[in-house]
Image: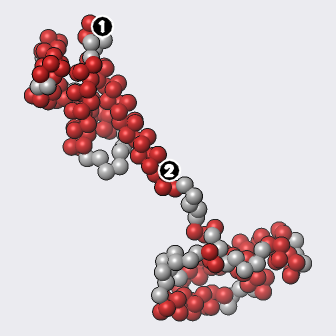
Amino acid sequence: MNEATEQLWIECVKENNDSAALVNLVEKYQPMVNNLRSQFFINNYEANDWYQDALLVCYQTCLIFDGNSGSKFGSFFKLRFKNYIVDCIRRDNAHKRRANIGTKPLESVPLAEQADVGAINDSSRIIIQKQLQEVLVEFSELELLAFQYLIGKLSKEDLQKQTKYDMKKIDSAIYRAQAKLHKGKSSTDLS
């Protein structure tokens, strides 16, 4: 296919909204579309979505393309399509960030503040209490106090006052308590 045919298709799209000419142009540049598809990932996008977007961007490119300036249609279409894809990815990521505003890991929220995290029913609560008691039996006295810190009952300063230990030893006890809880969770399946 020569440049004259391509120019004819562009003019048909621009002046007559010729869908057959538009399809011919997109099919000509399908390898470029496939190449960009292999470079970028957009959530929930399938091959048809890429093709539809290529048709849309190609149509818009035909409407504004001016071959008299010396530019090539293929390069212009590729630039516009790549920018369109990058913009789609940016919007998708912005949407994800918006959903994450104000969130924090559940582990960092004291248990007392975790109201209705999973709407635990009474039978589940009894099972969890039993499993927790089995794990807590293995705790030292200092680790039990550290557990009270983990569930939001005591502050680190309260721990220090009650135990007369330095912060390093208290942090170590908190770490050990967390490790034992995680170990107990995996062995008794606290989830």
- Label 1 neighbour load within 10 Å: few <14, some 14-19, many 20+: few
Residue 166's place in the image compared with 76, above or below, is below
Residue 2 appears in the rendering: no
Determine whether, in the image, residue 81 is placed left or right of residue 155.
Answer: left
The residue identified by callout 1 is 70
Indicate the position of residue 65 as horizontal and vertical percent values: 27, 17
Indicate the position of residue 48 as horizontal and vertical percent values: 21, 43
Q: Which amino acid is tagged 2?
A: Arg
Determine whether, in the image, residue 139 is placed left or right of residue 64.
Answer: right
Residue ID at (41%, 46%): 92
Residue ID at (31%, 51%): 44
Label 1, secondary structure: give it.
Answer: loop
Sequence-wise, which precedes: disc 1 or disc 2? 1
The residue identified by callout 2 is 97
The quadrant holding residue 56 is top left
Please tell me which residue lies in front, 144 or 113: 113
Indicate the position of residue 72 as horizontal and vertical percent values: 28, 14
Whole-number angstrom distance, CA of label 1 to CA of label 2: 41 Å
The quadrant holding residue 170 is bottom right
Residue 112's place in the image compared with 26, above or below, is below
- Label 2 neighbour load within 10 Å: few <14, some 14-19, many 20+: few
Residue ID at (49%, 84%): 120
